[in-house]
Image (cartoon, grey):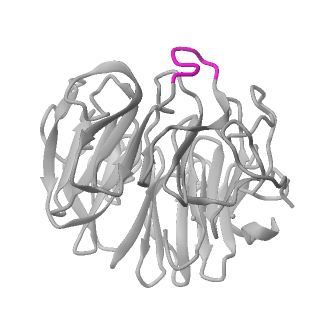
Amino acid sequence: MGLKIKGAFKPGIWHNMRFGVRSSAAIIKANRNFTLAIETQKLYASGNNFYGQLGTPLKYKTTDKQDNVVITEDARKVDCGLYHSAYIDTSGVLWTAGYNRYGQLGVAENVDTDDGISSWQDTGIEDAVDVACGDYHTLVLLKNGDLYSAGQNLMGQCGTGSTSEAITSFTKVKSSVKAIAAGQHHTLIIDNTSTAFGIGYNRYGQLGTEENHGTDTPVTTWQQFGTGASVIACGSNHSFITKDNVAYGFGHNYYQQLGTDETAGTNTGIFIPSAIAVGTVTKIECSSSGTMLMTGSGEVWRCGYNEQNQMGHNAQETLPLSKVVSKDAASIGMGTRHGFWVHTDGTIYVSGENNYYQCFAQDNSSYSIFTPIGKLENI
C-alpha cells in the first residue's frame, strides 16, 4: 500500500493522495524513471525523486527508490518532462515541481542551477485546462484558448518567435488553441479551426514540414502541417496527429516508432505524415522513441524502442507495429523504459523497468510482459 498523509494542500507543503481515456479511467504520465497518475482527482506519484519531480521531500537528492505516494486529492490534468512535473487542480490552478534550471516550472527559484524544487509551486496560472511538458519546457493552455510557455527555448520550442536559453516565467505565445503537445525540443498545437501547427527543432521532420529538415537550425515561426486534426502527441523527436480518427506519424523512425519500417535504422526521419492502419485512434502516448495507440474499441497497439520490454514484448529492441490488447483498454501511458495500459475495470497492467518503483508495483522487480498489478487505490 502506498504512503498516505492527509491534510490541506498548501504551496510548499506536500501531502498524500489515484489518468485519457474512458469515463473515470486513470490518466498516467511517465518519463525517465518516475510516474504520475490521476484517478478520481487523486494524484499519485512513484519512482525516482532526485530533482524533486514527485513534489515531495521524500528521497529528494538521492537515488533511492520512492514507492507510491498521494500528492493531492484535487487534480484534473498532469504531465511530466525529463525531470519536472506539472498538474492542474480542479479549480484550474497550475502547480509545478522538480528541475528548474531553464525556468520550466514558471517560477524564479533555482533557475540556472541543478538544484530542483521538491515542493509543488503555485505558478500563478489560473483557468488552465491542459498542460504538456517537453524535456525542459512546459506548455499550459487556458480556458479562453491562450497558450503560455516557459523553460528552455534554444530551438524556439516555447513558440515566442525567437530563441533563448531560458524563459523563466510563463509567457503568452499564441491564442485560439485547443490542444497541445511537447517533445524534447519541439511543440505541436491544434487551433480552434482544427489546424495543426509545429515549432522548434525539426532535424527529423517532427514538425511535419520540410522547414529546416535535416539541419540543427531552429524553426522559430509556427508551421502549419495539417487540417482536420483532433489528437496530437510528441516523443523526443517523433510526433503523431489524428485526422478523421486515423493516426499519422512523422519524425525520427530509427526504432520504427512511427509504425512503419521506412527509414528504420537510420537518422533520416520522415517529415511527411504517414498513416498507419490501426482503426479509430482516440489516444496516443509517446515515449522518447516509442509509441502506444488506443482505439475507440479498446485495442492497444505499440511500436518502437523496446530494449527494457516497456512495450510488453520480451527481448526485442525494435518492435514493429503490433497489437497488444484486443479489447477493454480504457487508458495508456508510457515512460522512457516502462509502459502501462488500464483495463475498463481499473486494473493497471505494467511492463518494463521498475527499479525505482516507477510502475507503482509493490516491489521493484521489472516486468518483461504486461502484468496486472491491481487498482491504484489498492496499491
Horizontal arrangement in the rendering, residue 246 relative to residue 75 (left or right): left
Image x and y of residue 297, in percent? 44, 85
Image x and y of residue 103, in percent? 47, 25
Point out the residue furthest to the top here. 112
Image x and y of residue 199, in percent? 23, 38
Q: Quadrant of residue 162?
A: top left
Image x and y of residue 163, in percent? 26, 22
Q: Is residue 180 magenta?
A: no
Q: Residue at x 84, y 52 (%)?
A: 5
Question: Is residue 377 placed above or below 88 in the rendered structure?
Answer: below
Label the magenta part by its dominant secondary structure. Answer: loop
Q: Along the line of sight, which residue is nearer the eye, 8 or 324?
A: 8
- Please identify the quadrant where the C terminus is shown: bottom right
Horizontal arrangement in the rendering, residue 187 relative to residue 290 (left or right): left
Q: Residue at x 27, y 29 (%)?
A: 156
Q: Along the line of sight, which residue is nearer the eye, 343 or 152?
A: 152
Can the viewer see residue 332?
yes
Q: Which residues are magenta?
A: 108-115
